[in-house]
Amino acid sequence: MHAALAGPLLAALLATARARPQPPDAGQCRPPGSQRDLNSFLWTIRRDPPAYLFGTIHVPYTRVWDFIPDNSKAAFQASARVYFELDLTDPYTISALASCQLLPHGENLQDVLPRELYWRLKRHLDYVKLMMPSWMTPAQRGKGLYADYLFNAIAGNWERKRPVWVMLMVNSLTETDVRSRGVPVLDLYLAQRAEKMKKSTGAVERVEEQCHPLNGLNFSQVLFALNQTLLQHESVRAGSLQAPYTTEDLIKHYNCGDLNAVIFNHDTSQLPNFINTTLPPHEQVTAQEIDSYFRQELIYKRNERMGKRVMTLLQENEDKICFFAFGAGHFLGNNTVIDVLRQAGLEVEHTPAGQTIHSTTASPPPLPFQTTHSSGTAKPPFQLSDPRQQQEEPGLASSSAPSRSQPALGLLPAIAAGITAPFLLHTLGLS
């Protein structure tokens, strides 16, 4: 993520912006006529055979697939090994992520939250449950996806969850997000395709490495975050809040050639922004502390760890083409996975659309536009020694990708880029 993001968070409240529904193609661009005019989130690690880094986006793959260049798809198809952040096709991953959300010792939220906050939360969830049938699309109903079932899948056990995960859950329960459920996000779609194509798949992180930092916030910080989240959603319900960035904006920038890391740090905006000029000084301090904690624990440390594991996997697969698909924000700006690899001496180059890749002389056949299902074969936790059995610090300034000037922003929404978005959009989205 970009170093400019070390400053305060946006005063705008990104997470709740998505509560305002937009038509599926609102503000979107059309695919350009030439491959060379497409945006590219592909980087090549120069070796023989090559390896590839691909920046994904945590939205339904159908919204972006036509804008992904043929050479990115060809790199995926040419690969023998495909690695993701987490293995979202593995039942262990999903069950472990679900378990890590739960309060310890059989506690309930009513036992741990202040009474007023608990009842505000309950009122908001009652509102969502009431509204959800009107949010569902005919296509969803045609697939047998109904409001009661979806609400229970997302929020059925909300009283047993830790408050920080309830905060994320609330931010996934907007009309725009509900209407996208039922289609795999791009990461999951690629994982399903890799399994169908009999590729070896794995992951570079353990569930615990993504989960524990979220659970590591102290209780007063969690209460602050949940309260601010509810305030934002209550303001949207009252019609008094608008925000500049939405999921639609994110899709537009991914599709239409804007490699601005700021946008991708927002990702699907699962986490709200908390810092604004109206907060009293002591609350601004709390917001800054949360921002700093997440920046260090879930951006810088993750990128460092992911980069080192990429290097290990490359060493173990010297004769194989490897393809690493992570959230695009891990490759953009400063302190990125690419920085880690370059500092270790690897040559990593951005690969423009239209540029021929290894052993590819023509455009590849398109991958089928369909939803596949995992075989359900469980895999053990992360083991670097066997790529077929894997679960899925700040560095120097990077020229990881062509990017535009980036304003100083805060970082809390960036957490969604790698941890909450794949999890929530899959496990909560019934992808």
Image (cartoon, rainbow, N blue to C red):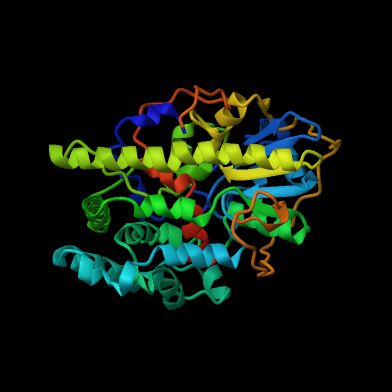
Residue 51: image location, x then y, percent: 73, 37
Residue 258 percent location from the top left of the image: 53, 32
For image coordinates 57% across by 53% down, the residue present is 86
Q: Nearer the viewer, residue 226 or 219?
A: 219
- 116 or 303, nearer to the observer: 303
Residue 308 picture quarter: top right
Q: Nearer the viewer, residue 94 or 146?
A: 94
Quick check: can you spot residue 280?
A: no
Q: Please, is residue 103 above or below residue 346 in the view? A: below
Query: Residue 160's image quarter?
Result: bottom left
Q: What is the x, y in percent for residue 282?
A: 14, 40
Q: Is residue 304 left or right of residue 281?
A: right
Image quarter hosting the C terminus: bottom right
Residue drawn at (46%, 51%), measured in percent from left and top? Answer: 210
User: Can residue 21 be seen?
Assistant: yes
Residue name at image x 55 percent, y 62 percent: 93
Q: How many marks?
A: 0
Q: Position of residue 117 (x, y in %)?
A: 18, 63
